[in-house]
Amino acid sequence: MSNVHISALTKRLCGHPDMYSFSSKGRDGRRSDSLYATATLCGDCRTRLQRSVENPGTGFFPVVLPALAGRANAISWAKNIRLKTLRKIGPAMAQLKKSDDPLATAALAAYEMLFKIPRALFWIENRDFPFDSAWVVSEVEHLMRRRPSSVVRLNESSAFFYWSQADIAVIACAKQAASAVIDVAVVPTLRGDLPPVSNAQPVATQSIFL
């Protein structure tokens, strides 16, 4: 017997109504799916945000880097890692700075939050992490939420997670920079009230997962 999923038009974090596949079993599972849907960006906004940092070409973005804290040998190693990361991400940051897209502004705020991290061990532990477009989407979603979501896991590579433990004032600063996309429909809602999940029709396993 094949699994049955419910696809429903759901208002996402950006305010855009988007089809979402509810696949978890039971009332609690459906509630968890619903919370996740409303705590994440719609497909169009996610794609737009990813494209804003992909294929940036060449460029330079000036960043004031804080002194690193840790053991002397760790600091020396972390400096090289951080500089290598900045050289890699700098062109994308320069590209984001030129954009008037509020999502791009939020992405730049996320990257600036990253390079404020002074802990040498953070850079060493994440020396192979790409800080790519998927990371940017996750960080922007963290900044856009009014409060932390129980259904979205924070990880050790997250600048948002680091500063939530170290100094929430840095997060407040990033949220201010990204204020254009916080509590605002980034993609205008063109349809009226959304139908409740319970009214949606079940569809086969070919449902698209976001």
Image (spheres, rainbow, N blue to C red):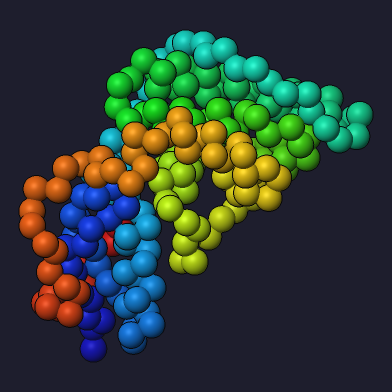
The residue positioned farthest toward the right in the image shown: 72
Up/down of 54 relative to 191, above or below: above
Q: Nearer the viewer, residue 147 or 200?
A: 147
Residue 102 x/y as whole percent: 32, 30
Residue 83 x/y as whole percent: 67, 21
Q: Nearer the viewer, residue 173 or 11?
A: 173
Q: Nearer the viewer, residue 196 or 6?
A: 196
The quarter of the picture where the N terminus appears is bottom left
Q: Nearer the viewer, residue 148 or 60?
A: 148
The residue positioned farthest toward the left in the image shown: 191
Q: Is residue 91 left or right of residue 157?
A: left
Residue 160 x/y as whole percent: 57, 44
Image quadrant where residue 98 sits: top left
The quarter of the picture where the C terminus appears is bottom left
- Would you say residue 98 is visible in this rendering? yes
Q: Residue at x 52, y 14 (%)?
A: 61
Q: Is residue 123 left or right of residue 141?
A: right
Q: Residue at x 32, y 60 (%)?
A: 38
Image quadrant where residue 136 sits: top left
Q: How many marks?
A: 0
Up/down of 135 relative to 97, above or below: below
Residue 50 x/y as whole percent: 36, 36
Q: Residue at x 34, y 70 (%)?
A: 33
Image quadrant where residue 123 sits: top right
Q: Residue at x 37, y 64 (%)?
A: 36
- Would you say residue 129 is visible in this rendering? no
